[in-house]
Every structure is written in structure tokens, then in C-alpha cells.
Amino acid sequence: LFSVLQKTIRPVWAVRGVHMSAVEVMKRPAPEDTVTASFGRFISEVKPRHLSSVVLQRSKRMLLDSIGVGLIGSTTEVFELALQHCQHMYAPDDISFVYGRKDTRLSPTLAAFVNGVATHSMDFDDTWHPATHPSGAVLPAVFALSDMMPANNKPSGLDFLLAFNVGIEIQGRLMRFSNEAQNIPKRFHPPSVVGTMGSAAACARLLSLNESQCSHALAIAASLSGAPMANAATQSKPLHIANAARLGLEAALLASRGLEASPLVLDEVAGVAGFNAFYEDYIPRPLESPSDGGCMFLLEEQDMAFKRFPAHLGMHWVADAAALVHKLLVGVGSGTVSPAHVQEILLRVPHSKYINRPFPESEHQARHSFQFNACSALLDGEVTVQSFTPSAIRRPDLLEMLSRVRVEHPHDNQANFNCMYGEVQVTLVGGDILKGRCDTFYGHWRNPLTNESLRKKFRNNAGAVLHSDNVEQLIEVVEDLDRLEDCTPLLSQLQ
Amino acid sequence: MLRKGITESFGAAIHALNTSQLTDGVINRSKRMMLDTLGVGLIGSTTAVFNKALKYSQLFHSEEKSSVWGKSGTSLPPHYAAFVNGIAVHSMDFDDTWHPATHPSGAVLPALLALAEALPSRPSGLDLLLAFNVGIEVQGRLMRFSREAYNIPKRFHPPSVVGVMGSAAASAKLLGLSPAQCSHALAVAASSAGAPLANTATQTKPLHIGNAARRGLEAAQLAQMGLEGNPAILDMDCGFGIYYKDYSPYAMSDSTAGGFNWILEDQDVAFKRIPAHLGMHWVVDAALAARAKLEAVMTFDLSQIRSIKLKVPPSKYINCPLPTSEHQARHSFQFNACSALLDNKVTVSSFSEAQINRTSLKELLSKVKVETPDDNKASFDKMYCEVEIETSGGQCFWARCDTFYGHWRRPLSHVDLVEKFRANASTVLSSEGVEGVIDAIGNIEMMQECSSLGSYVRMTRNLNEEL
């Protein structure tokens, strides 16, 4: 199309006094050279053989964790609400499975929606650097789409893994376009910005869309991205991931029907914001075509953090630091910790308004409170799924501990998951001071969960809704996924 | 900055506003908006983007069904009806525009009509009018929270920011939600707001309005089921404030008793005469006036035109020297000026592929130079357009438009508004349907229940019927 345009302009160009406006058109980059086109090309051309063994291994761990977290998430109130909404608004559509509900199926985008809610409902899902929750935005969509494909034409295990990894990779690439993305967010909740794009990319890959359709899927998704931080730590937060999954799938489906959007959505055009609308600073870079001798996925260089308990990632530092102090306290005395012995608790944490809550009043707030998680770990030695039940939140002991907490934000403690630390300093009534510090919690990408620990988490989560045979079979089929001709065995375990 | 109670005040107002507070002025203006929106949506059902969205939406099924405007045999789940009808409304960039700039009606009316058809007891015409005005009012209020909103946008497409909030408010009103639920509807909707400007002037733009309608409705229904969001969503910079560089929200005053000052009463909307970005209307009126001046002195001859100078406000996304698609053409000062000069009019058919690709038009386009004078502000309240034609003989014909016909300062007459509706609606509806809608909207405040409206928008023309 562009070359045709150039031909018509050429005779005009020869005439003297051609106007500046026409020249401007010729100065625009050729469509093939744009960042947006490079992303479209990558998604459409990348193949299973481009997945290295490290990437395969790490992404299978992500798959397992995400499924487990989604299964236990299906026991939450917000999941129930979302499911009822979908069933109420729409007739039964026997296509895509719903986590934890054997006899329930929904149409693909709605299944992606409710499974996304489940995955993020307890803030128990994976976290990456720069910060986002990558799997929850992608896996539900890829599952829903796989269910939608005809029985005799299901993706192979490798195709499934490839689509999943494309969804993760695109998110990682997009976050590297800005410095703002490196720190704990203040405006837009990252999963709502990059998650939708990742889901669109993954679905475009699974649908085998061509280069142009892949670009348009991303562009359509951009118009569906973006939700404010204020809704994090409320019951609505899981919908950010849910909508990312659902709307990314929708964008890919619309693109497959020929819907077109901006061909410059990822590029920077002065005066007309594209994807850069979501960032204060933005420098896009093209993705190299995978056919140019090999391909490096970001997951190879930057691993994932898996949570040990269902709360915001920042909580894991203070919990581990407080657990150290708990051990000291318990070693000294009777085996339990009592607030009566404690005079003051000082927390040294990075500055971040939405995870600094002295007296959380709901489960959602508790998952986003340095104070709450520190005190829970001080009392119990650890933080678990049970630490956030209504009765646990309202324990008199806990409330007493909370009233003794003081928070400091040292200058060297940056609000960044790659460099932050957590310190807990307890001053006892007798005057003794006990200190615990955590630089890298167990589960962080620098100190990854062992396969054993990851499976234990999965067994606890999945076992809340599935039979133990089912649980063990899931572990096995995910482990073997890249060797399966057909991903049906994985899907059938979840139906 | 510590603010309190703003979101709460919105929730309380949405809940408490009642039909007795609708003034004659507001009823009259909002009925005009409803009629125009329906007409524009009906002709919009003939577009490619609408058909793609319709095919996609037909993947979904539900027990409750709502009408698809302009389609006699098709219905969809309410959310998807709101989606496709919203897309239809904005598909040709033919829908209403307000100040500060947004397209308010397309985000609200499709959601309300879809919801009304799905409710167990049908609302009255007045209920519908009230909910509609609540949806418009909330949008107007939100845009007044920032100075950025007063100028032609650069980052987020305004309908995607305030439209979904308006739809949530209107739907919450029609559903009769409690004040707290109304607040939560707004909070949940905020997480569905914000689409980047880069997708305007593409086929995806209409989805901004379609999604605003659909997701606002969804937010209200989720709030009805008890979903909660941040109860201070409008108060916080990291809430609704994220969509603006400057943000100063304020509360809605207590509206339980006495009159209510609707923004629509003070600030009317603009209705378009051509299916193109609002800015084009100035340049078209100026171009037509300049051509008239030329024709008073000589015959119009394309080959005699040496150059055309346009003086317009600065705005990247409506400055397109050589549009190659219908969407780009609707967002091009140059294209609209040249179409007006060439054909002595700009109509719905000016944007067809054949018309866009005319060599005579392209030749004229190559002679265009665009200037953005400092005193020409990128604001629909302040901008102007000037067109200057220079002939090869050295003569200059110049015209300026400060306020085009259809702008809120120079509103379309009732006759012309209805004429626009008839021209649009009769592309898909039978004359019974066309007149039925005019009648139903005309008497809406008297209607006990508004299901007749749903029937009229589905009374399509017989394919054999002559135009």
C-alpha cells in the first residue's frame, strides 16, 4: 500500500514547490521498520524450537504454580461472584473449563475471565521483574482458546508452551520500554497494562495469525488496557488480571476476523499517544525476528518469583525477617510469642502507600500490609493461607501487636522488587532488642523455590478442590507437556 | 492531597436524582441527543467494523436478549447488544460531541436500551430519560476535574475515559442501586477506562465507545451483585486521576431536595452534519464559503487552482495530508477541505473508497499547505478555520469559520436534526420504523414503558423497497 502511495507522489515531487505536508508523509517509517511490525513478525514467526531447555523448565514451573493458585482461588468469594455474573448474563456454553467446577463450562472469553479472577483472587500468583503478574493474564486465555479448538486439532504440548511463552515474553519486552516500570507502580496496575498485550500475543500465536493480524491484535488490545492502582487492595483487583486474559483473547479473535487498529501503537508518535499513553517515559525497541539465528527469551535471563503465601510480594521480605525474630523469641521463652512481652516493633521497609496499612480491615487490605504480615509472622513463625481468614485477622493478640508497630522508610530501601529489603526490629519489655533482616526471601528469583517446595505449594492449593489422584496426575502431565503430541491430557485433568 | 467524600457524593447523587428534577431545557436537549444517536447508530449498522463486531458477538448466547439496532432478526446478550450498538453509533464518527470534548451519548444510550430490554419490569420513558441524563451529567462532571480535558486530546481518547463511567452511572440509576453500590459501580468501571489516542483514525476507534457502553453496564451489574472497588476512586490521584496530568476533583452537591443544576442546561452538545471528526466541520464551512466567493467572480476550475492554505489549530491526529483509508479521511483537515472545494458539499458518500481515491482529489490535496497560527487553540470552544484559495491568475479567495452550523453556539434547528435522522435511519429502517422512532422519542416522557422503541429500531426496510 505504501509503495503505491510513493508512486503517486513521485510526479508531484518533481514539480517545483512541493508542500511540506506531502514531504512529511514520505518521511514516516516504512511499515516494515516499525516497532509494532517487529512485534507482529516475532509472534507470527517464532517456533517451538526457539524455546531453550531453561525456558521450557521455568515456564513449566510457572504453569504448575498458576494452575494450583487458580484452583484454590476458585474457593474465594470474588470468584463466586464473577462466576455467577457470567452464568447469569450468559446461557451455558459448553466450551471452556472453569477452575474447580467439574460440571461448569463457559464460552472462551468468559472462562478466561473467571479463571483469571481465580488466579489473582488471593494475590498468590507469580511476580516478575519488572513488576507484573505475568502468568495469570496469559494462561487462562490460552486454556480457554485450546478448549475452543476442535477435538481433532488441538495444539500440541509444545505449541501450548510456545503460546504461553510468547505471552510472557511480550509482557517482559514492553515493560523494558520505560524506567517507570522498574519501580513499584503508582498509576496503572501493571497486569492491566502489559497483561492484556501478553494475552493478545499468546492467543494470536495459538491461532497462527499472520504478521499483520498479530500486530493488529496488539493494537486492539492496547485500547483495552489500563486500570488504576486505587483498585488494587480492593475486591476488584483480581478483575485486572481477569480482564487482561479475557480482553487479550478478544483482541486476537477480533484481529482474526480482520479488525484493524493502529499500525504504530507501540511506536512513539509525537502528539498522538499509543501504548506510551500508560507511561511517563517511553523508549520502544524493535523485537528481532526469531529466524535470525536463534532467539533469547527474557525468561532465560530473568526468572520468576513464586509466592509462599497469598499476599503482595513485598510482604514476603518482612515475613521472612519477622520469622527470624520469632525463632529467636521462641528459643528464649515458652514456645509462643506474646504481645505482652513486646514493647515496640520497628519495620524498615520501602516507601509505598498502598502496602503500608497499620490496621487492615479486610482480607484484601491484610494482603497488602507490611504491618499485618510482620505481626502475623512474629506471632506464628510464618504466614500461610490461613493467616488471612476473618478470625485470624481479628485476633486480639494480632491487634495488640499491630498497635505497637512503627514504620520507617530508610533512604537506601528502594521501592523495587530487585533491590528492596525488609528489617524487623523488636524491642522487648525488658529492653532487649532483637533484629531480623531479609534481603532475598525464599521464592524470590535470586533464591528460587526448589521443585519440591513448588510441588508442595501446588499440592496444598490443588488439593483444596481436587482429589489427590487428580493432583498427582496434573503434576505429571505438566512435567511431560513438551513431549505431548496433543495437550488434551492437560485439559482433561481440569475439566 | 487528602480529599474525602467525592466518590461518595457521586454515589449518593446517582441514587437520589429523580425525575422531578429534570428541567424542560434538559429534557428537550437530551431527547435531541437520543434521536441523533439512534439515527447515527442505524446508519452505522451498515459499516464493516459493525459487521465484524456483530459476527464476533454472535459467539455468545444468553437467555435475556436485547435488540441490535437496524437488524430485524438478530438479538444478542445485553452486554453485546450494548457493544455492537455502541460501535455502530461511533463507526462513522457521526455522533454528538460535547465540551469539554467527548462523545457522550454513544457510551450511554446503547447500554440503557440494552438493559431496559432485559429488565423484568420495563422502565418508563421518564426513567429512561433520567438515567440517560445521569450518564451524561457524570461524564460532564468528571471532565471538569482537569484542565487537560479542555483541549483536543493527546494521550487517552476521552470517550474511553469518561464514557465508561457515564455508562456505569446510567446503568446503576436504571437498576436502582443503593448509594454505596453506585459508588462501587464507578470504581469497577474505572478499571475499564482508558484507551490510547493512536487507535482513533483506525477501524478500532468505534470500539472505544462500544466498550465504554458494554463495560459500564457490566460494572453496574457486578456492583449490584456485591462486587466492590475502591470507595475513594474519584478522590485519589492513583484512582481516576491516573488518566490526567492535572486532577482536581470536587464533590457533587446534595441533590435530595430542590432543583438540580444539570451541566447540559448550561452547555449544549454539537451535532454533526458530516460523518467526520468535529474539527472538520469548521474547515468544511470555511472551504464552502471560500468557494462561494470564488464563484461570485469566476467559474470553479480545478486546473486554475495554484494553492490552498489552511489555518487550523495544532493537532497531530487530524492533520493527515494524504489519507488512504476512510478512517483517516474522517480525520484529515486537508481531505475535508478539498472534498468541500471539489464537490461543493461533504456528505456521507464523500468518504467511500472510490471518492477517496479520485485523482482529481489527490491533485487538489497536493496543493494544500497547513498552518497552525498561535492564536488558534486546540479546543472545540475556541478554534477557527481559515481557507485561502490562490488561483493561477494570482487571485485570492479567503473565508473563515468561527462557529459551524451544528456547533453548540449555533445549534441545528429541530427540522434539520429530524432531517438528519430520517436520512440516516431510512438507509436501514422502513418508513414505519423511521417515523415510529421519531414519535417515540418525541413523546418519551409520556411513555409508560419503552418497549415500542425496541421494536421500531428493528423495523427494517424490505430489500426490494426503493430508497
Image (cartoon, rainbow, N blue to C red):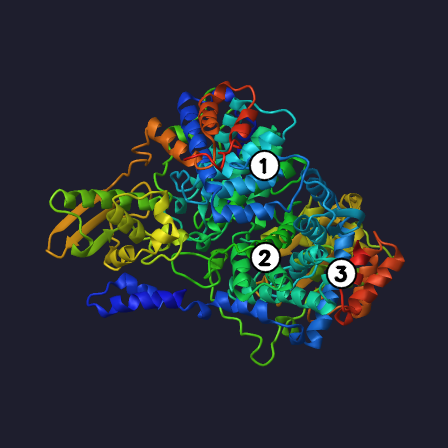
**Mark 3 Cα-neighbour bin, 10 Å: few <14, some 14–19, many ≥20:** many
Q: Residue visible at 50% across and 44% down?
A: B87
- Do tag 1 and tag 3 residues touch (Cβ < 8 Å)? no
Q: Is the residue at mark 1 from the same chain as the one at mark 3?
A: no
A304 to A121, vertically: above or below: below
Q: Nearer the viewer, residue B70 or A273?
A: B70
Disc 1 on helix, strand or loop?
A: loop
- State how far apart marks 1 and 3 are (Cα): 54 Å
Front tag of 2 and 3: 2
Quarter of the picture holding the C terminus of chain B: top left
Front tag of 1 and 2: 1
The x and y percentages for residue B191 are 57, 47
The residue pinned by badge 2 equals: A252
Disc 3 on helix, strand or loop?
A: loop
The x and y percentages for residue A324 are 77, 64
Q: Nearer the viewer, residue B102 or B187?
A: B102
Residue B338 shows in the view: yes
B266 to B258, vertically: above or below: below
- Number of the label disc, if any, that sits on residue A308: 3
Q: Nearer the viewer, residue B200 or A365?
A: B200
The answer for which chain carries disc 2 is: A
**Mark 1 Cα-neighbour bin, 10 Å: few <14, some 14–19, many ≥20:** few
